[in-house]
Amino acid sequence: MSARSPLLTLWFWLFVAFLFAPLAVMAAMGFRDSGFVAFPIQKWTTRWYADALADRDYRVALWVSVQVAVWSTLLSMAVGVPTAFAVARLRGVVRAAAVAVVVLPAFLPIVVSAIALRMFLGRLGMEPGLSAIAFGHAVGSVPFVVVMLLTRLNAMSPSLAEAARNLGADEAIVLSRIVLPFLSPALFGAFLFCILLSFEDFMRSFFLGGFDQTFPVLLFARLRFGFNPGLAAISAVVLAATMLLGLHAERFLRRRGIDR
Amino acid sequence: MTARAGGAPRTDETPAIEVEGVTKRFGTHGALDDVSLAVAPGLFVTLLGPSGCGKSTLLRAVAGFVIPDAGRLRIGGRDMTREPPHRRPVSMVFQDYALFPHMTVRENIGFGCEMKGMSRAEIARRCAELLELIRLPEVGGRLPEALSGGQRQRVALARALAPDPVSLLLDEPLGALDLKLRLEMQQELKAIQRRTGKTFVFVTHDQDEALSMSDRVAVMRAGRIEQIDAPERLYARPATAFVAGFVGAANMIAMQVEETGAQLACSPVAAPGLRWVLPAAAVSSAEAPRRGGAALMVVRPEALRVGPPPAEGFPSIEAEVVERTFFGGRVHLRLRGPGGMTLVAEARPQDSPAPGEVVTCHALPDEIALIAGDAAAPVPPPARPQT
Amino acid sequence: MTRLLVRARRLAVYRTAIDALSASPWLRALVVAVVPVLWVLVTNLAPLVQMVAISLLDRYPLPPGETAAWTTRHYRAFVERPLYLNAFTRSFVFATLVTALTLAVMFPVAYYLSKAAPRSWRVRLILLVVAPFWTSEIIRSFAWILMLANRGAVNSALMWLGLSDAPVEMLYSRFSLAVGVIYLSSLYMLLPLYAALEKIDDRLLEAAADLGARPLTRLRRIVLPLARDGIVVGCTLVFLLAVGLYAMPQLLGGPGDTLFAATIGQVFGRAGDSWPLGSAFSIILILAALGWVGLFAALVGRGGRRRVVR
């Protein structure tokens, strides 16, 4: 299809522009020296960025987001790793069914799964708040952790563990010296992935949070109230941070995923 | 070499590995059916058979990855039937080598020693010694992915030898190599076995590999051992029709036994007019021939000679040359005998007949094996290796 | 660590435990399966089961000491009230259209990445395209507000270029919402498409070209059938995402265009007997969405298999 390549190439770069233009516009808006959000930008200032970083509400919300991300990630890994091991032992229809049940939350409309979880946690006596959000995020992340680890586990020859046992390693040593090191790229990737998933999540944080607002929830509330360049500034900062972390996670997964 | 496992006393008569009546079923499919085998220390023993014959299952049972439903298993004289794999003094070499990809060659080789609780210094010394043995002293710091196929193979061997096991179990270890490397590694493997004096139990479906490397070959079929013997004897004196057909090429002629005693007289089923006399020593099966019973005469192609027999009463036959195939130093002749019998003979190119000629062929009585009784029953052709 | 474990073997307790583990596959399975089974029951299944139960209750939550009667009236309310039915239909039509649009936009992108782009660039280009997706829905919605507002970047550019005199109304409409949703969901389309297209052997296309197939014929007869799995997975993911959107429609959508997910959210936000009603709506949404997606997968997927067999 060499004749169509220029068109394809053009389309691709148009798509890249479509992806990045809004983000660039947002970052630029953060520099507008005015109380209103509007184009064109005639006067520039760094005051919005300085203000945004100093804003106490943002800092509190970001801190909540970070705490939620850490706890939910730890929980997701604690559940996801054994789940992947358990599923990896299954074969055939049973395995397909187990995978289906495990990844179910990823296929439900998030509104529904968030609300269902809120009602259920309420019944268990867990109040909306930081721990409820963390728990909810873990529910959303576990399917991804399991799928990522399973992919790596499938690439692991069963004879590796057998070789280790044959050479005198018991179950505990096989796990600590063979299986976990082999999984480590996927473990690390899944870890970063969970942090990002939790950090960007709005829906579960919105429905499961009480007075604890994560950053996206705070931003949502502010946006419904009105716009100013400060919102663009803080968004751009968070965007840059998550993008860097995300790139790092992706690179890591891809680079280490190729060798085996 | 005396590898003393757990300090259990043992004399040289104690088999390194002793399998007694081991049976294993997977679902309804019987993988091992009452298998018994004793491997004397220092021998190179090969389990040979088509895929699905149970040879790998037997090896994995010795290693402890398969727990038998019945039977006993002794390693170095100690009962290990129920022992978990990590406490058995045997080391396995896997077909895909199973080198730990995240450890260096040295860490791989040292793993078994580490598990035995050896000190760092001892482990380092042992690694150096083994790297020397496999003639790869310079690769110790590399990761397995940086090695060639043959190098990986050798490292896998060194890793298995490192903890000084009673026996090495090799599960088709040369299967992944190309032909040239494979022949090279056969030599190397045999040399290392001789140098270390270790007992090797080797699994393969390749008869050439089995015949050229082993001290003893056990031919397996459908979960049973059909025959266990030295390679030459296995070739010359097959005990069953399956062994005759699986190990080397063979003319197999269905016979009817007419007279028994010091001399056996028998006729080919396809040509009742012929009558051949063989010494009783020609019988290679466990069962003795009965008068009027069926038997199978096995003549290797190179033992079927073109030309009149040197003496009266030697088995001989008239046959027409159907096809002549040239192989350099020798030719293969496809012959059609009486009653539609198809025979294959090997001859030297200079004195071989042309297609269409009718020739007399004979075989010397001591190059003939006669399989009598049930063992002579024709077997379905061996299943093609699946992998 | 390993040395410690090796030493630990001298302890009888440790040996017994490890031996029991290696001896019994069932015990191993039990140890491995406890956490996953509990988790799946508590987080994946129990909340849904509870939701189904609540949807069939007259009232919930109940004051202490009272019991509720079973009823199907909340499901009937869905059919009887045009307000709800309209939002539901609107959601499904909208999500279906957006899915189709996303497929149309992303197929050439995936094709470029998997077939046309220089091999050595591919990983870098994919990273480039994936990068923006690590940002929350809210930030991305806001970015599009800045783009499409009357005094936003697009209008400002249009007027500066002299293409229009007055701002074009784009924000708070189905158009702006569709753009936002495509922006949000395109990665979920791209990755499965890319995975499927990458597996197609380039020599197949060359062979087809040798046999005289024109580019469009090659696309229709070779690329599309072989990329079918990727298309099904991509469309499924995008549709499920689009049909459950809650925040973005409130930020980018028009005032009259309430979607069903927002309706559910609002119902739950109300006081009184709203939980059973919201639960009923949630169940309807799940069943309808999975049914719709399943139908699509069955139609497209089965068509493919039949063609392969023949």
Image (cartoon, grey):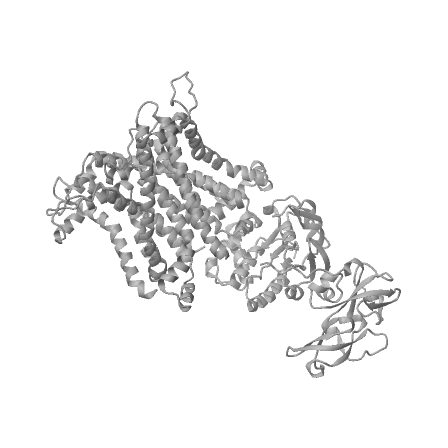
Classify A105 as above or below B281.
above
| Image position, residue C55 (x, y; %) | 40, 28
Dividing the image into 4 quarters, which one contains the N terminus of chain B? Answer: bottom right
Q: Residue at x 36, y 26 (%)?
A: C275
Q: Is residue C280 left or right of residue C10?
A: left
Q: Residue at x 37, y 42 (%)?
A: C240
Could you say which quadrant of the image residue B50 lies in?
A: bottom right
Q: Residue at x 29, y 48 (%)?
A: C132
Which of the two residues, C98 or A234, is positioned nearer the viewer here?
C98
Instruction: State whether residue A74 appears in this view.
Output: no
Could you say which quadrant of the image residue C239 lies in?
A: top left
Q: Residue at x 45, y 52 (%)?
A: C303
| Image position, residue C40 (x, y; %) | 46, 36
| Image position, residue B116 (x, y; %) | 56, 48
Residue extending furthest bottom? B350
Looking at the image, how many numbered discs can be counted on the residues?
A: 0
Q: Is residue B313 left or right of residue B376?
A: right
Instruction: State whether residue B280 appears in this view.
Output: yes
Which of the two residues, A80 or C112, is positioned nearer the viewer here?
C112
Dividing the image into 4 quarters, which one contains the C terminus of chain B? Answer: bottom right
| Image position, residue B251 (x, y; %) | 74, 69
Classify B219 as above or below B339.
above
